[in-house]
Amino acid sequence: MFWLKHMSRIKPKDAIENCKESIKCTHFNWIEIAAYILKWIPFSAICGIIVGLIASLFDYFVLLINTTIPNKPLFVATFAVLVAMITGLYIKNDATIAGPGINYVLNHMEKPVSFKSLIKKFIISVLALSGVFTAGREGPSFFIGSSISLYLSKTIKLKEGYSRKIALIGAGAFTSALLKAPLGGAIFALEIAYVSDMEYESFPQVLIASVFSYLVFSFLRGKHSLMNLSGVSTAWSIHSIPMLMLLGLVIALATYIFISSFHFANCISSFIAPVFRPIVGVILALPLLVILLSHDKLDLLNASVNYQALTNISVIHLSIYQSLKYLLLMMSIIPLTIGFGISGGLILPSLIMGAILGNLFGGLFNENIVLFSLSGMAAFLAATAKTPLAAIVLVLEISQTDLIIPLTASVIVSYIFSYGVNAYTSQQECKLNLPIQ
């Protein structure tokens, strides 16, 4: 018969032996299973709970200070200068706590910073994020979370040799809590170390810690998402995709301009003594901060406190003039503040600038500005941080929407066409370039 002619010519005895070998290779890896049950799951859960509690305290102080600052130019300027002076005094002999903090963590995952540095970073970050500087929480959270996790591993005497994984567990957990995005925060921590790679093997541990920190934080600080888009249409159609791809291309160019100016400001600031560095940058930025305050219908100066600005940009139709004005102000203020040592991250500024460009495009093409604003947010973050997957998931989580296809269209284009432009200079190209520890 036909099927008999085409049967394998392997002898039955050899076929049986091959099957036996295949079965031998298929088995439970009890060593790895035991390692997760007895070590990684308990450690990640405990770390997540501790980080969630500290993140809640962090958020509480940010909101507390914010409520005491009158929304007047004189008070805002005075508080900005005060924060700059305190930051300068703190970084005078401890430059590790200046700026976003992610570059430092990527270069020093083998051990935590000193407890004194951790307290200083906590203080200057709370002050910087209390409603004057439009800075992101992920920089300080990455810095603080990684050290908390490393300290915990030493306390319980976790076997050495896993410092990189342990640092990422805490960093992801803290970021997930403050952004209320457990999956997005976890992926960001795993993706940020590389331009085109990811720490896949640490995913279960980081995600477990992120979920626990998110649950603790949400229980103590509220379960609401960062953006409130209830009742707002996010409808999209296939003809929107080419325009979203064009948006990604424009964002790639805008990212180049922004990151170049940020690195230039950071380089210029290195010629100034650390104690004076933040105050010089803030004084240069003060006129821009006052202008922003006087026209701040988007609530940009309080964005790091309540993230309301992201919702505002997504639902308020901005004119071309307004969009360009806000974009230029952001592109100028961020380098002069964070670039000069003010403690804060670049996720929030990236989301804001991307949302503004998305709003502009949506208006120009008479499209859904919510759709374009959210797509712009993801695209700008992907291009800035080189974290395309985290950008998509993060925006989906904080907006509580289902826009994975349009977001992906703008993200892929902005990511590809901004290749070589990195906000975090300590990123490796991929794991093959990572030094062996």
Image: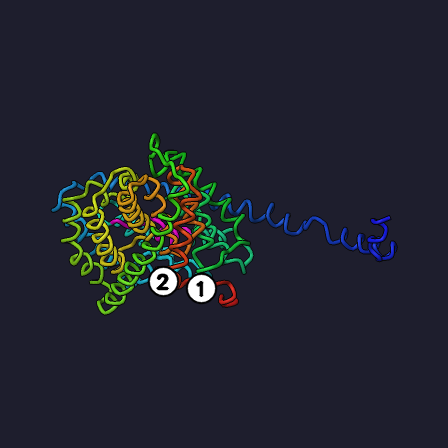
Q: Is residue 331 above or below residue 232?
A: below
* Inter-mark Cα distance, 2 to 1: 13 Å
* Colour scheme employed for the rendering of this structure: rainbow
Residue at 39% in and 50% down: 410
Residue at 26% in and 65% down: 264
Residue type at mark 1?
Gln
Q: Residue furthest front?
A: 2
> Could you tell whether 124 is left or right of 109 in the image?
left
Q: Position of residue 86 (x, y in %)?
A: 22, 55
In-front residue for pair 223/26 = 26
Can residue 62 be seen here? The reply is no
Q: Position of residue 4 (x, y in %)?
A: 86, 50
Q: Please rate how many residues cluster around mark 1, counting C-alpha atoms within 10 Å: few if below 14, some from 14 to 19, many from 20.
A: some
In-front residue for pair 363/90 = 363
The region drawn magenta spans: 134-145
> Could you tell whether 391 is left or right of 36 in the image?
left
Q: Helix, strand or loop at disc 2?
A: loop
Residue at 24% in and 51% down: 327
> Could you tell whether 353 is left or right of 205 in the image?
left
In-front residue for pair 408/385 = 408
Q: Which residue is mark 1?
A: 428
Find residue 399 and report its image quarter: top left
Residue type at mark 2?
Val
Dominant secondary structure, magenta: helix
Q: Position of residue 32 (x, y in %)?
A: 63, 51
Q: Helix, strand or loop at disc 1?
A: loop
Q: Is residue 162 above or below residue 41?
A: below
Residue 181, numbered circle: none
Residue 421, numbered circle: 2
Can residue 111 be seen here? The reply is yes
In-front residue for pair 186/241 = 241
Q: Please rate how many residues cluster around mark 2, counting C-alpha atoms within 10 Å: few if below 14, some from 14 to 19, many from 20.
A: many
